[in-house]
Each structure stands twice: as C-alpha cells, then as structure tokens.
Image (tube, coloured by chain):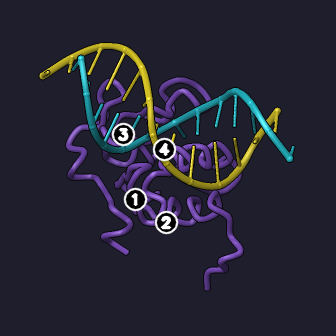
Chain colours: A purple, B cyan, C yellow
Amino acid sequence: MQQETLNFFDKVYEVAKLIPYGKVTSYGAIANYLGAARSARMVGYAMNGSVGKDVPAHRVVNRNGLLTGKQHFDGTNLMQQLLENEGIKVIDNQIQDFETVFWDPAKEL
DNA sequence: CAGTTGACACCGA
DNA sequence: TTCGGTGCCAACT
C-alpha cells in the first residue's frame, strides 16, 4: 500500500526501514532499487533527514562498506557502535565481512 | 528562477 | 595498486 506520492527521499526511508537486523546495505543498492542507480548521492542526502524518520541510517554505508556518513551522526563513533551492537564487526569505520552482512533490497525484495 | 551542494560511484593516471 | 578527478541526479539555499 505504498503511495507513489512519496518523493525520492521518502522512498529511501521506506527501503532503509526494511533493512533487517544485523544487516547493512549500500547507497548504490538502494538507489538501484529505486531505479536511480546514478543517484546514490541522493540516498545519502535523504539520510540527512533520517532523524525523526525511524530510519536506521547506521545500516547504510557506501559501496566499500565504509562508514562514510559516520561524521553526520550525533557524536563520533556512534554509528560504529550501533553496527557492532547488531553483531556487525566494524574496525576503523570499515565493516568486516561486508559481503556477509550485505543486504540487497533489489535482490531480497 | 538559477546556482551550489553532496552520508557515492566509476574511470583514468 | 593507490590516489585523484569527473559524472549524475535531485534537493537545498
């Protein structure tokens, strides 16, 4: 029952909220699922307003599995702490076994 | 209304 | 192989 009245941002929020516990995805994967593979940057932009949207932005990382958006979080290593809290190994802002915890919306959905 | 920005991704040196 | 620069697309100022 999705309304196409949703903007690109809202669509990103919807997908982000679908990310299962202990899993992560990439901006490009979400953009690809939305049909805007070249708009990966927009996905990150959308996450900027994720606060108050119940969107687990900490589960969204770049193609390299690197916590590039960590800086946008409240403090400093909050994003990394959240991921580790879900069982995801993160070392120096880099997700370990990225392929193992990777969740592709276009593939799972 | 027009210009700049940006939590990325890809290509080339 | 590592580093740098360019490209894309929609939102934000």
Q: CA distance from mark 4 to mark 3?
A: 10 Å
Q: Chain of mark 3?
A: A
User: Which residue is labeled 2 in the image?
Assistant: A34
Helix, strand or loop under label 1: loop
User: Which residue is labeled 4 in the image?
Assistant: A58
**Among numbered discs 2 and 1, the one appearing first in the sequence:** 1
Helix, strand or loop under label 2: helix
Helix, strand or loop under label 3: helix
Given the image, on which type of amino acid does mark 2 rest? Leu
Rendered residue at 59%/60% (across/down): A13
Disc 4 vs disc 2: Cβ atoms closer than 8 Å? Answer: no
**Structural crowding at the residue carrying mark 3, measured as other residues with C-alpha within 10 Å and reported as few (<14), some (14–19) or many (≥20):** some
User: Which residue is labeled 3 in the image?
Assistant: A84
Q: CA distance from mark 2 to mark 3?
A: 28 Å
Residue toward you, A7 or A80: A7
Q: Position of residue C13 (x, y in %)?
A: 82, 33
Mark 2 against mark 3, which lies toward the viewer?
A: 2
Rendered residue at 38%/75% (across/down): A109
User: Which residue is labeled 1 in the image?
Assistant: A21
Q: Chain of mark 1?
A: A
Rendered residue at 71%/74% (across/down): A5
